[in-house]
Protein backbone atom coordinates (compact mmCIF):
# COMPACT_ATOMS: atom_id res chain seq x y z
CA UNK A 1 0.00 0.00 0.00
CA UNK A 2 1.38 3.39 -0.99
CA UNK A 3 1.36 6.42 1.28
CA UNK A 4 -0.51 9.41 -0.10
CA UNK A 5 1.61 12.38 -1.16
CA UNK A 6 0.40 15.97 -1.09
CA UNK A 7 0.64 18.06 -4.25
CA UNK A 8 0.12 21.77 -3.59
CA UNK A 9 -0.74 24.38 -6.20
CA UNK A 10 -0.58 27.47 -4.01
CA UNK A 11 0.73 31.01 -3.70
CA UNK A 12 1.71 31.29 -7.34
CA UNK A 13 0.61 32.00 -10.90
CA UNK A 14 0.78 29.28 -13.55
CA UNK A 15 0.34 30.04 -17.24
CA UNK A 16 -0.14 27.80 -20.24
CA UNK A 17 0.55 24.50 -18.50
CA UNK A 18 -1.22 21.14 -18.46
CA UNK A 19 -1.84 19.97 -14.90
CA UNK A 20 -2.67 16.28 -14.53
CA UNK A 21 -4.47 15.53 -11.26
CA UNK A 22 -4.61 11.80 -11.86
CA UNK A 23 -2.35 9.90 -9.47
CA UNK A 24 -4.13 7.43 -7.19
CA UNK A 25 -1.45 8.01 -4.55
CA UNK A 26 -1.77 11.83 -4.39
CA UNK A 27 -3.94 14.41 -2.68
CA UNK A 28 -4.16 17.60 -4.73
CA UNK A 29 -4.60 20.98 -3.03
CA UNK A 30 -5.89 23.76 -5.31
CA UNK A 31 -4.89 26.92 -3.50
CA UNK A 32 -4.73 28.93 -1.43
CA UNK A 33 -3.99 31.94 -3.62
CA UNK A 34 -3.32 30.15 -6.89
CA UNK A 35 -3.99 31.65 -10.31
CA UNK A 36 -4.14 29.43 -13.39
CA UNK A 37 -4.26 31.21 -16.75
CA UNK A 38 -4.76 29.45 -20.10
CA UNK A 39 -4.06 26.12 -18.44
CA UNK A 40 -5.57 22.67 -18.95
CA UNK A 41 -6.62 21.06 -15.69
CA UNK A 42 -7.25 17.32 -16.00
CA UNK A 43 -9.07 15.79 -13.03
CA UNK A 44 -8.92 12.03 -12.70
CA UNK A 45 -9.14 11.47 -8.95
CA UNK A 46 -11.93 10.94 -6.44
CA UNK A 47 -13.55 13.54 -4.22
CA UNK A 48 -11.24 12.96 -1.25
CA UNK A 49 -8.14 13.43 -3.37
CA UNK A 50 -9.02 16.93 -4.56
CA UNK A 51 -9.13 19.77 -2.04
CA UNK A 52 -10.30 23.08 -3.58
CA UNK A 53 -9.24 25.98 -1.35
CA UNK A 54 -9.25 29.35 -3.10
CA UNK A 55 -7.88 30.82 -6.28
CA UNK A 56 -8.69 31.99 -9.79
CA UNK A 57 -8.88 30.11 -13.09
CA UNK A 58 -8.75 32.33 -16.18
CA UNK A 59 -9.37 31.03 -19.72
CA UNK A 60 -8.66 27.45 -18.63
CA UNK A 61 -10.00 24.10 -19.80
CA UNK A 62 -11.20 21.85 -16.98
CA UNK A 63 -11.50 18.24 -18.14
CA UNK A 64 -13.04 15.52 -15.99
CA UNK A 65 -11.20 12.33 -16.90
CA UNK A 66 -13.53 10.53 -14.47
CA UNK A 67 -16.75 11.84 -13.00
CA UNK A 68 -16.14 14.67 -10.54
CA UNK A 69 -18.66 14.40 -7.70
CA UNK A 70 -19.80 16.30 -4.63
CA UNK A 71 -17.37 19.19 -4.71
CA UNK A 72 -17.97 22.75 -3.51
CA UNK A 73 -16.09 25.06 -5.86
CA UNK A 74 -17.61 28.29 -4.54
CA UNK A 75 -14.25 29.55 -3.25
CA UNK A 76 -12.77 29.37 -6.78
CA UNK A 77 -13.26 32.11 -9.36
CA UNK A 78 -13.79 30.74 -12.88
CA UNK A 79 -13.58 33.28 -15.68
CA UNK A 80 -13.74 32.36 -19.37
CA UNK A 81 -13.25 28.65 -18.68
CA UNK A 82 -14.38 25.61 -20.66
CA UNK A 83 -15.56 22.41 -18.99
CA UNK A 84 -15.66 18.93 -20.50
CA UNK A 85 -16.55 15.57 -18.97
CA UNK A 86 -18.98 14.60 -16.21
CA UNK A 87 -19.70 16.66 -13.11
CA UNK A 88 -22.26 15.71 -10.46
CA UNK A 89 -23.24 17.56 -7.30
CA UNK A 90 -20.86 20.46 -7.94
CA UNK A 91 -21.51 23.97 -6.62
CA UNK A 92 -20.20 26.90 -8.64
CA UNK A 93 -20.29 30.64 -8.06
CA UNK A 94 -20.42 32.58 -4.82
CA UNK A 95 -22.44 32.10 -1.65
CA UNK A 96 -21.92 35.35 0.23
CA UNK A 97 -21.11 34.79 3.87
CA UNK A 98 -21.79 31.04 3.68
CA UNK A 99 -18.68 29.21 2.55
CA UNK A 100 -15.15 29.62 3.80
CA UNK A 101 -13.26 31.99 1.48
CA UNK A 102 -16.55 32.84 -0.25
CA UNK A 103 -15.21 36.26 -1.26
CA UNK A 104 -12.84 34.59 -3.73
CA UNK A 105 -15.57 32.59 -5.49
CA UNK A 106 -17.48 33.30 -8.67
CA UNK A 107 -18.17 32.19 -12.20
CA UNK A 108 -18.67 34.13 -15.43
CA UNK A 109 -18.30 33.67 -19.19
CA UNK A 110 -17.81 29.92 -18.92
CA UNK A 111 -18.74 27.18 -21.38
CA UNK A 112 -20.34 23.91 -20.20
CA UNK A 113 -21.77 22.97 -23.60
CA UNK A 114 -19.55 19.88 -23.88
CA UNK A 115 -19.94 18.82 -20.25
CA UNK A 116 -22.51 16.58 -18.57
CA UNK A 117 -23.87 18.20 -15.44
CA UNK A 118 -26.14 16.52 -12.90
CA UNK A 119 -27.44 18.10 -9.69
CA UNK A 120 -25.02 20.99 -10.18
CA UNK A 121 -25.91 24.36 -8.68
CA UNK A 122 -24.84 27.84 -9.77
CA UNK A 123 -24.79 30.53 -7.08
CA UNK A 124 -24.69 34.31 -7.23
CA UNK A 125 -23.89 34.63 -10.91
CA UNK A 126 -25.33 36.00 -14.15
CA UNK A 127 -26.50 32.91 -16.02
CA UNK A 128 -26.64 34.90 -19.25
CA UNK A 129 -22.83 34.62 -19.35
CA UNK A 130 -22.87 30.83 -18.92
CA UNK A 131 -23.13 28.50 -21.90
CA UNK A 132 -25.09 25.49 -20.66
CA UNK A 133 -25.27 21.87 -21.84
CA UNK A 134 -28.23 20.87 -23.97
CA UNK A 135 -30.70 18.01 -23.55
CA UNK A 136 -30.52 15.44 -22.01
CA UNK A 137 -29.26 17.98 -19.48
CA UNK A 138 -31.69 20.70 -18.49
CA UNK A 139 -31.22 23.82 -16.37
CA UNK A 140 -33.83 25.51 -14.21
CA UNK A 141 -32.89 29.19 -14.17
CA UNK A 142 -33.98 31.27 -11.14
CA UNK A 143 -35.73 28.33 -9.44
CA UNK A 144 -36.81 30.39 -6.42
CA UNK A 145 -38.27 33.18 -8.54
CA UNK A 146 -40.23 30.63 -10.57
CA UNK A 147 -40.88 28.28 -7.65
CA UNK A 148 -44.63 28.70 -7.33
CA UNK A 149 -45.08 28.27 -11.07
CA UNK A 150 -42.96 25.12 -11.04
CA UNK A 151 -44.88 23.59 -8.16
CA UNK A 152 -48.34 24.31 -9.57
CA UNK A 153 -48.03 21.59 -12.20
CA UNK A 154 -47.47 17.81 -11.93
CA UNK A 155 -44.01 16.33 -12.53
CA UNK A 156 -42.94 12.83 -13.53
CA UNK A 157 -42.45 10.26 -10.80
CA UNK A 158 -41.52 11.78 -7.46
CA UNK A 159 -39.41 14.58 -8.96
CA UNK A 160 -39.60 17.91 -7.13
CA UNK A 161 -38.18 20.79 -9.23
CA UNK A 162 -37.61 23.18 -6.34
CA UNK A 163 -37.89 23.12 -2.54
CA UNK A 164 -39.10 26.41 -1.08
CA UNK A 165 -39.55 25.48 2.59
CA UNK A 166 -37.83 23.42 5.26
CA UNK A 167 -34.18 22.61 5.92
CA UNK A 168 -33.55 21.52 2.31
CA UNK A 169 -34.98 24.67 0.73
CA UNK A 170 -33.03 26.39 -2.01
CA UNK A 171 -30.55 28.96 -0.81
CA UNK A 172 -31.29 32.59 -1.73
CA UNK A 173 -28.09 32.70 -3.80
CA UNK A 174 -29.22 29.91 -6.15
CA UNK A 175 -29.10 31.20 -9.72
CA UNK A 176 -29.74 27.90 -11.49
CA UNK A 177 -29.77 24.13 -11.10
CA UNK A 178 -28.66 21.75 -13.87
CA UNK A 179 -29.79 18.12 -13.98
CA UNK A 180 -29.08 15.16 -16.24
CA UNK A 181 -32.48 13.87 -17.32
CA UNK A 182 -31.63 10.13 -17.63
CA UNK A 183 -30.23 10.10 -14.08
CA UNK A 184 -33.17 12.09 -12.74
CA UNK A 185 -35.65 9.80 -14.49
CA UNK A 186 -34.03 6.81 -12.83
CA UNK A 187 -34.03 8.48 -9.41
CA UNK A 188 -37.63 9.57 -9.79
CA UNK A 189 -39.04 6.37 -11.23
CA UNK A 190 -40.23 8.03 -14.43
CA UNK A 191 -39.68 7.72 -18.17
CA UNK A 192 -37.18 9.98 -19.93
CA UNK A 193 -39.84 11.05 -22.44
CA UNK A 194 -42.00 12.28 -19.57
CA UNK A 195 -39.21 14.56 -18.40
CA UNK A 196 -38.72 16.07 -21.81
CA UNK A 197 -42.41 16.89 -22.10
CA UNK A 198 -42.40 18.34 -18.58
CA UNK A 199 -39.46 20.70 -19.03
CA UNK A 200 -40.67 21.91 -22.42
CA UNK A 201 -43.56 23.65 -20.65
CA UNK A 202 -41.30 26.42 -19.33
CA UNK A 203 -39.23 28.93 -21.27
CA UNK A 204 -36.94 29.53 -18.27
CA UNK A 205 -35.75 25.92 -18.35
CA UNK A 206 -32.75 25.67 -20.69
CA UNK A 207 -32.58 22.40 -22.62
Image (spheres, rainbow, N blue to C red):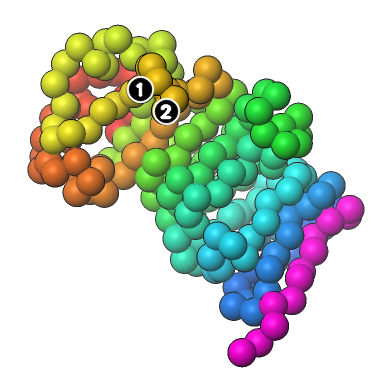
Above or below residue 7? Residue 186 is above
For the residue labelled by badge 2, is the local secondary structure a helix, a strand or a loop?
A: loop
Q: Quadrant of residue 110?
A: top right
Residue 154 appears in the picture as rendered: yes
Residue drawn where x is 55% and y is 21% of the image = 173
Residue identified by numbered label 1: 163
Residue drawn where x is 24% and y is 16% of the image = 151
Q: In which quarter of the image is residue 19?
A: bottom right
Q: Residue farthest to the front? A: 167
- Is residue 4 magenta-colored? yes
Residue drawn where x is 66% and y is 87% of the image = 2
Residue identified by numbered label 2: 168
User: Residue 142's x, y, as percent?
Assistant: 43, 18
Location of the N terminus (image quadrant): bottom right
Location of the C terminus (image quadrant): top left
Front residue of this view, candidates 74 and 85: 74
Q: Label 2, label 1: how many angstroms apart (C-alpha)?
A: 7 Å
Q: Residue farthest to the bottom? A: 1
- Is residue 168 magenta-colored? no
Residue numbers of the magenta segment:
1-12
Q: Do the residues labelled 2 and 1 touch (CB within 8 Å)?
A: yes
Binning the other alpha carbons within 10 Å of mark 1 as few (below 14), some (14 to 19) or many (20 upward) gives some
User: Residue 16's x, y, as percent?
Assistant: 76, 60
Which label belongs to residue 98? none
Binning the other alpha carbons within 10 Å of mark 2 as few (below 14), some (14 to 19) or many (20 upward) gives few
- Residue 34 as seen in the image, left or right of residue 84: right
User: Residue 133's x, y, as percent?
Assistant: 39, 41
- Residue 117 as seen in the image, left or right of residue 108: left
N-terminal-most mark, 2 or 1: 1
Q: In which quarter of the image is residue 166?
A: top left
Amino acid sequence: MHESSNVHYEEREIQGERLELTSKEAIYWLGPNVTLQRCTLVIGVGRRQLVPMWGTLLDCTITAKREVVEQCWTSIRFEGCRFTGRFSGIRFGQRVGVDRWWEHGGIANCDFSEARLDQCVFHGCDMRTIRLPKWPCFTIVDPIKHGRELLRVPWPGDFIPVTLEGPLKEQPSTSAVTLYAPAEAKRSGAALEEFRSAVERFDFIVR
